[in-house]
Amino acid sequence: MRRPTGKVVGIIKRNSRPLCGMLMPSPIKEATRHLFTPADRRMPRVRVETRQAASLQAHRIVVAIDGWLRHSRYPNGHFVRSLGECGDNETETEVLLLEHDVPH
């Protein structure tokens, strides 16, 4: 049985589009690092450092990926902006438009 083998030697162009999703609460009280779960399941979870986690619960937010350390399970990113409450029609519509790169 043949196995595909290869090695990434470089990245020519980086996909730097923002990700929409939700911030998962950290099990540690007063933690500043939290995991962000993107709406697009093909994208990895992102480690975000923020002190606003309590106010961002149950909100859809936008996060940008800053980098991914070689031995880290998750990439590092930063909070860009809040879109609104989860389940709100306007918020969910904006998430869909941002995820599919539709100008609005």
Image (cartoon, rainbow, N blue to C red):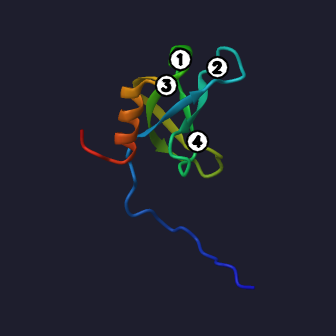
- Left or right: 65 in relation to 98: right
Q: Earlier in the sequence, mark 1 or mark 4?
A: 4
* Mark 2 in CB contact with mark 3 (< 8 angstroms): no
Q: Which mark is residue 31?
A: 2
Q: Which mark is residue 86?
A: 3
Q: Residues within 10 Å of mark 3 (few under 14, many from 20)?
A: some
Front-most of residues 82 and 103 = 103
Badge 2 amino acid: Ala
Q: Where's residue 64, x and y in %?
A: 43, 38
Question: Which element is circle 1 on?
Answer: loop
Badge 1 amino acid: Arg
Q: Where's residue 1, x and y in %?
A: 75, 85
Q: Where's residue 21, x and y in %?
A: 50, 35
Q: Earlier in the sequence, mark 2 or mark 4?
A: 2
Question: Which element is circle 4 on?
Answer: loop
Of discs 1 and 4, which sits in the foreground?
A: 4
The residue indicated by pointer 4 is 45
The residue indicated by pointer 1 is 51
Q: Residue at x 69, y 79 (%)?
A: 3
Q: Residue at x 32, y 47 (%)?
A: 101
Badge 4 amino acid: Arg
